[in-house]
Amino acid sequence: KPENILLDENYRAVVTDFGLSKLIARDESRVVTEIRGTCGYLAPEWLLEHGISEKSDVYSYGIVLLEMIGGRRSIMKVEVEETNKNTNKKSKKKKLEYFPRIVNQKMRERKVMEIVDERVEAGDEGQVMKLVCVALWCIQEKAKNRPDMATVIEMLEGRVTVNEPPDSKLVVVDLLAAAGGGDDDVDDVT
């Protein structure tokens, strides 16, 4: 969640906890609690009320990593113009655009440099691909498929090979729209 990323006096990011406000006992693997958090950063298990685990924070980290790479929010409302085929009239519709879905597609097409924020000094394509893959591993819909944060750090530091993550439908934005996470005037999701 963006409010948990702080900047120090030298503008270096300091990540605080991602919002687990209840300690988990050693014999507990997950906790069921009220949903608290910012839409777009919540793991699917929050929305499906399956309980949370340390892997829920890994999901939030992956979303933030993608936002840093692309320089944009993970979920954005965009206006698109559509032409009615029968009447040939143009109308504007609002859609929720889910950035991780776009990133996933660009990774599969081997065009990851197209999603890099122009304000970022991008390294070589291999480095960007590695970051994208790490982020997509972090946001796997099934919590058991996500790495733990220790593994994420090893991936980022190059001590663990980063394989291409499995393809995913990334349905979180669809769940958010169905749950009223978007505005009532949003017509579609991409």
Image: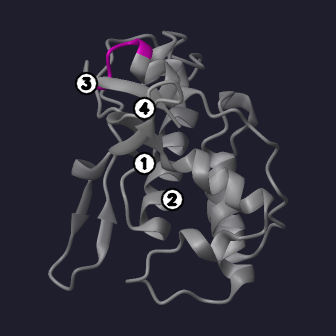
For residue 190, above or below residue 156: above
Q: Amino acid at mark 3?
A: Asp
Q: Which mark is residue 74?
A: 1
- Res. 80 image quadrant: top left
Q: Secondary structure at mark 4?
A: loop
* Left or right placement of residue 6 versus residue 127 in this view: left
Circle 2 residue: 66
Question: Residue 183's mark?
Answer: 3
**Could you give the CA–CA distance between mark 4 and mark 3, rounded to whole angstroms?**
18 Å
Q: Mark 2 and mark 1 in contact? Answer it, CB < 8 Å.
A: yes
Q: Earlier in the sequence, mark 2 or mark 1?
A: 2
Marked residue nearer the N-terminal end (1 or 4): 4
- Crowding at dot 3, Cα within 10 Å, few <14 / some 14-19 / many 20+, comes out as few
Magenta stretch, residue numbers? 178-182
Q: Dot 4 corresponds to which residue?
A: 42
Marks 2 and 1, how far apart at CA = 8 Å
Nearest to viewer (mark 4 / mark 3): 3
Q: Amino acid at mark 2?
A: Leu
Image location of residue 16, percent across then percent down: 31, 53
Q: Nearer the viewer, residue 158 or 74?
A: 74
In reply to whether residue 34 is colored magenta, the answer given is no
